Image (cartoon, helix red, strand yellow):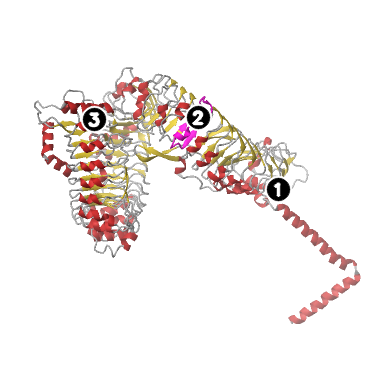
């Protein structure tokens, strides 16, 4: 499907038509033949030089623009008759590997002087970076323009209506920008237009009816538009009926066909339509069945060969029955993410006589459904990835091979299912070229005699449980280009495994090899002589060891080399890379390698990704990094560098999306360079010795970690003139920042995470922090903040964590925390000067799983409504991934998602410890070291998922709740230094996870319940309870009761009432018994009367019985 697989298509028909135009033939002549004495005009040459001056050319795309004759410049073609510039082709492009990075692009603002190119016919600027700028209106002055491609250029604003005056235009591509507003009706004036693409923008409104004037239009892409159908009955589709030449129509994510059946009628009348995309247009079983009468005569055009109905909602029977009735000439059918369920139609394979490609991925298909496709004799590609296949692999392949599809199928994707069994015979589909079995439940060894399709090119089996060694038979696949066996449990010596793969003809064809995350050991072989065509080599996360041989070399075609997280040692020199001119990705991190590179070395490659974490690169910052102009990712954390950073190094960051130089010994002040970080990177400078002011240019990052340095000034960074639109995460903890925090936080529109802990800030918390309404984590711990928490923080309704502990904050605990911050999961106000009682409003925080109010001046009782902390009462509490993620505006689209870690400092078992993203250990309540009084509420025992409960150092009285044993997850319990009395509940011995217990310094009495857990603690856990005895304290000697098994003697909280009831009952029995029996025994007349009564009663009973 042309549009699906290429974001920037240049349709062959359009190009051919352009080439047939006389003017463009002159251009082609000029490109290929002699131009004679004709040279470009000076004013046009100067306009191009102005364009060059306005661009930042990181990739040397304009490096040839220095000679006198601009007609010889890269991307420029002139007329060989007049010398006028007629073609300007300066498109960027993307590489498409695992990292998906741009390979080259220009950036900047297009200067108005370009208008001098009045004879321009072809302008292609796609995949460049003109972010934050609008499409220049002066483009409308290029009145001779036939071809205009501005796709993927990050333009914003509206589509200039002036483009409607380009009357000769045949091709207009504006897709994948950030354009907004409505489609200008003036585009309907482009009567010669054959191709129009606006998809992937934020356009909305009603499609102007003037587009119906585009009678020459062949291809129209409006995916993603927010189309408004004003009258709600689909009459807005009337303009489609006049587009009689249309062959390609895409309206995905743009329509609600459930309300607009007239769109279908308009589509059915397009007699030349060959490709139709209706992704996510609210088509469903209900729509098909409810519109039966209205659509009874509906048929897709006979010319239709490609149909995309993905992201709608169907079941198998109704959909396939409908498709069988409305179309029969389909070649490609896309139904991914359409919630398909039920059984397939028996007649589908009969109807679809031309179907070659069928995509059913991300649905609910079961193995039995595949039989329906076995007799589609033309099918060459079948994708059922991410479904509900649970059968054995052999059974699935057997079902498919039972029909004629066995002779046509070339691509089969079964990945992301729950397919079981072993990989034993893959030859049942003999003409397969691509087979995807990734992320299933395949187990066992691959047998040595396994059979494969002889023409297999790509084999992906990663993320299963395949074990053993790689069989030699894989090496005999002469067409094999890609092999991915990563994330399994394969074993063996790597050199032996490589020998198996290279023992046959696969050594010459193999281009991509991924054996990462297995259990291969041994040293590295010399790959250059083994796989001469290798482009990708991934060996990460194995058990490779030993020294990297000095003489080892890698294939000259290598683009990606990944060997991270092994135990490799030795020295890496420039000689290992001398022939790797195409290398783009290098990952050696997590090894014990030493890089010894000559000072003046100029690498033969231009890297996009360089990851050297934990290798030895220092002590100086290597100068060869300066030559790497297109770095997108750089990680040289913990590599032993002790150096300052030069301006050239920071200039590298302008193109990166990730930079990590943490845990080194970089020193000095970072000057405030005039740099623009165009990719909005994640930057970590943590754990170095940087000092002085935080430079303003770092505000352009999307995530910034400056922790554990010596920065001393925050003002210019926070209060800069510009707005920081994209900074979402800021960590400036553990520096030497002091004074009041600047009150300028309104400049940060996307901040989700702020950590200013462990500095020396003072004064009040800035009220402007409440303007960061996207805030999810705010950590103010261990400073000298005073006063009350600003009420403006109630606007931060997305807060998940608020840690203001270890300051000098005062006042009552704000009730608005409970009423406004309903998403809170962690709240710490420990070690401040808060007073008053615990506000009942806190009990509204049902998602709260950690509460620390310790070391304050809080009085009153422990609230009974703490039982409302349902996150502490249920195991399935907190695993929404969105809790720890945020989105920011980004170059790759309106929003881009990032994750953050929750890291908090807790008093744990008497010491401060950091916990990271560990919710189990963080389920706790700490109210210690306050002035709380009253009983421990029995309602606390409902919080059965509590791991830590600390109520020590208060004035609590009463008994320990008898059912405290219900807190079976407790690891830490401290009730010491209160005024608790009574006995220790027997149920406490049932908590088998308890590793720390302190009940000391109370008024407890009685015997310590016998149980393995309670006797394992030191005597200090029970000391200073004068009435308490039993192990581990002194043995109880007086009136020692017999201990029944705990299961029989476990007491209830109402045991006192029960004891009193039985005492009263015994006393009543005694009085009643002796009151009657004593009278009979000692009074003769009463005794005689009583027995006469018994004799008469006996006689009456006997008489009636007989």
Q: Secondary structure at mark 3?
A: helix
* Residue 248 in picture, x, y percent from top left: 22, 49
* Front label number (1 vs 2): 2
Q: Earlier in the sequence, mark 1 or mark 2?
A: 2
Q: Secondary structure at mark 2?
A: loop
Q: Secondary structure at mark 1?
A: loop
Q: Is residue 748 magenta?
A: yes
In this rendering, the count of numbered labels is 3
Q: Answer above or below: position of 114 versus 822.
A: above
Q: Earlier in the sequence, mark 3 or mark 2?
A: 3
Q: Is residue 209 magenta?
A: no
Which residue is identified by label 3? 113
Report, in whole angstroms, how far the alpha carbon at label 1 lies from the one at label 2. 66 Å
Count neighbours of disc 3 (C-alpha within 10 A) and say few if under 14, some if 14 to 19, many if 20 or more: some
Q: Residue furthest top?
A: 599
Which residue is identified by label 2? 742
Relative side of 641 to 1054, left or right: left
Report, in whole angstroms, how far the alpha carbon at label 3 lies from the one at label 1. 98 Å
Quarter of the rendering occupied by the C terminus: bottom right
Which residue is identified by label 1? 1043
Q: Are marks 3 and 2 in contact (CB under 8 Å)?
A: no
For the stretch drawn in magenta, the main secondary structure is: loop
* Residue 593 in picture, x, y percent from top left: 38, 24
* Residue 70 in picture, x, y percent from top left: 17, 27
* Front label number (3 vs 1): 3
In-front residue for pair 1086/291: 291
Report, in whole angstroms, how far the alpha carbon at label 3 lies from the one at label 2. 43 Å
Relative side of 852 to 57, left or right: right
Look at the image and give the residue range highlighted in magenta: 730-756
């Amino acid at each position: 499907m042309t549009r699906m697989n290429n974001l920037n298509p240049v349709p062959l028909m359009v190009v051919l038509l352009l080439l047939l135009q006389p003017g463009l033939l002159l251009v082609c002549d000029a490109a290929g033949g002699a131009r004679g004495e004709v040279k470009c005009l000076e004013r046009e040459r100067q306009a191009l030089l102005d364009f060059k001056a306005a661009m930042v050319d990181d990739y040397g795309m304009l490096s040839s623009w220095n000679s006198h004759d601009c007609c010889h410049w890269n991307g420029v073609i002139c007329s060989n008759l007049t010398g006028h510039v007629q073609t300007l082709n300066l498109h960027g492009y993307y590489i498409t590997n695992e990292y998906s990075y741009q390979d080259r692009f220009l950036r900047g603002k297009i200067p108005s002087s370009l208008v001098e190119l009045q004879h321009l016919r072809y302008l292609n600027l796609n995949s460049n970076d003109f972010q934050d700028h609008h499409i220049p209106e002066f483009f409308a002055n290029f009145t001779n323009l036939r071809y205009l491609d501005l796709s993927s250029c990050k333009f914003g604003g509206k589509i200039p209506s002036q483009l409607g005056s380009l009357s000769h235009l045949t091709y207009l591509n504006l897709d994948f920008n950030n354009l907004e507003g409505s489609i200008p009706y003036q585009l309907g004036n482009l009567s010669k237009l054959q191709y129009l693409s606006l998809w992937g923008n934020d356009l909305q409104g009603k499609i102007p009816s003037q587009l119906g004037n585009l009678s020459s239009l062949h291809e129209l892409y409006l995916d993603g538009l927010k189309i408004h159908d004003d009258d709600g009955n689909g009459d807005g589709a009337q303009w489609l009926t006049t587009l009689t030449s249309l062959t390609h129509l895409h309206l995905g994510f743009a329509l609600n066909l459930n309300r607009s059946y007239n769109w279908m009628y308009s589509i059915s009348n397009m007699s030349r339509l060959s490709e139709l995309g209706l992704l996510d247009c609210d088509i469903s079983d209900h729509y098909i069945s409810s519109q039966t009468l209205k659509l009874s005569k509906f048929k897709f055009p006979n010319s239709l060969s490609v149909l995309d109905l993905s992201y709608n909602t169907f079941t198998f029977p109704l959909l396939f029955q409908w498709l069988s009735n409305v179309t029969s000439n389909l070649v490609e059918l896309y139904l991914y993410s359409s919630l398909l369920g039920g059984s397939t139609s028996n007649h589908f394979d009969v109807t679809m006589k031309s179907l070659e490609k069928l995509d059913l991925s991300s649905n609910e298909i079961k193995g039995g459904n595949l039989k329906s496709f076995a007799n589609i004799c033309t099918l060459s590609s079948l994708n059922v990835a991410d479904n509900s296949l649970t059968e054995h692999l052999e059974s699935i392949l057997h079902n498919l091979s039972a029909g004629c599809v066995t002779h046509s199928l070339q691509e089969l994707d079964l990945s992301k299912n729950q397919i079981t069994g072993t990989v034993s015979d893959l030859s049942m589909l003999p003409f397969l070229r691509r087979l995807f079995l990734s992320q299933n439940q395949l187990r066992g060894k691959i047998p040595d005699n396994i059979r494969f399709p002889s023409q297999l090119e790509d084999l992906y089996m990663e993320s299963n449980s395949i074990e053993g060694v790689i069989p030699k038979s894989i090496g005999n696949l002469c067409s094999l280009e890609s092999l991915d066996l990563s994330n399994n449990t394969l074993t063996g010596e790597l050199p032996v495994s490589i020998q198996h793969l290279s023992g046959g003809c696969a050594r010459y064809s193999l281009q991509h090899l991924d054996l990462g995350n297995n259990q291969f050991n041994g040293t590295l072989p010399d790959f250059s002589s083994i796989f001469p065509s290798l482009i990708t080599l991934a060996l990460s996360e194995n058990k490779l060891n030993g020294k990297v041989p000095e003489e080892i070399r890698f294939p000259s075609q290598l683009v990606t080399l990944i060997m991270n997280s092994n135990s490799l040692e030795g020295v890496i020199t420039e000689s290992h890379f001398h022939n790797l001119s195409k290398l783009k990705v290098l990952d050696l991190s997590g090894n014990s390698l030493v890089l010894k590179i000559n000072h003046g070395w100029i690498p033969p490659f231009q890297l996009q990704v360089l990851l050297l974490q934990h290798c030895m690169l220092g002590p100086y910052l290597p100068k060869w990094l300066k030559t790497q102009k297109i770095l997108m990712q750089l990680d040289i954390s913990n590599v032993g560098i002790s150096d300052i950073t030069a301006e050239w190094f920071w200039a590298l960051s302008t193109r990166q999306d990730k930079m990590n130089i943490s845990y080194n010994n970089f020193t000095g002040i970072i000057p405030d360079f005039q740099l623009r970080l165009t990719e909005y990177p994640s930057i970590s400078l943590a754990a170095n010795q940087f000092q002085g002011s935080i430079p303003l240019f770092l505000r352009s990052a999307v995530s910034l970690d400056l922790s554990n340095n010596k920065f001393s000034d925050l003002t210019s960074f926070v209060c800069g003139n510009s707005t920081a639109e994209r900074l979402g995460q800021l960590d400036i903890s553990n520096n030497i920042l002091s004074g009041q925090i600047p009150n300028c936080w309104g400049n940060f529109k996307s901040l989700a995470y702020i950590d200013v802990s462990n500095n020396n800030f003072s004064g009040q918390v800035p009220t402007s922090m409440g303007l960061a309404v996207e805030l999810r984590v705010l950590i103010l711990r261990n400073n000298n903040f005073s006063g009350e928490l600003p009420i403006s923080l109630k606007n931060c309704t997305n807060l998940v964590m608020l840690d203001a502990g270890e300051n000098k904050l005062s006042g009552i605990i704000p009730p608005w925390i409970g009423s406004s911050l309903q998403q809170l999961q962690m709240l710490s106000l420990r070690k401040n000067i808060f007073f008053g009682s615990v506000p009942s409003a806190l009990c509204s925080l049902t998602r709260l799983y950690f509460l620390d109010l310790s070391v304050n001046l809080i009085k009153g009782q422990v609230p009974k409504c703490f039982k409302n902390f349902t996150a502490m009462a249920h195991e399935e509490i907190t695993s929404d991934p969105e809790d720890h993620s945020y989105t920011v505006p980004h170059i790759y689209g309106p929003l881009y998602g990032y994750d953050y870690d929750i890291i908090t400092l807790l008093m744990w078992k008497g010491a401060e410890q950091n916990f990271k993203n560990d919710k189990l250990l963080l389920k706790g309540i700490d109210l210690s070291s306050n002035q709380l009084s009253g009983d421990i509420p029995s309602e606390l025992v409902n919080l059965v998922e509590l791991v830590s409960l600390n109520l020590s150092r208060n004035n609590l009285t009463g008994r320990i709740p008898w059912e405290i044993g219900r807190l079976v997850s407790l690891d830490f319990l401290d009730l010491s230094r209160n005024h608790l009395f009574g006995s220790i509940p027997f149920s406490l011995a049932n908590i088998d996870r308890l590793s720390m217990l302190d009940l000391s310094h109370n008024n407890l009495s009685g015997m310590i319940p016998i149980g393995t857990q309670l006797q394992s603690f030191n005597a200090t856990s029970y000391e200073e309870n004068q009435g308490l005895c039993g192990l581990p304290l002194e043995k109880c000697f007086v009136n020692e009761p017999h201990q029944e098994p705990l299961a029989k003697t476990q007491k209830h909280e109402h045991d006192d009432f029960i004891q009193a009831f039985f005492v009263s009952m015994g006393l009543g029995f005694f009085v009643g018994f002796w009151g009657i029996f004593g009278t009979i025994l000692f009074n003769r007349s009463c005794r005689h009367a009583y027995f006469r009564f018994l004799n008469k009663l006996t006689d009456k009973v006997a008489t009636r019985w007989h």
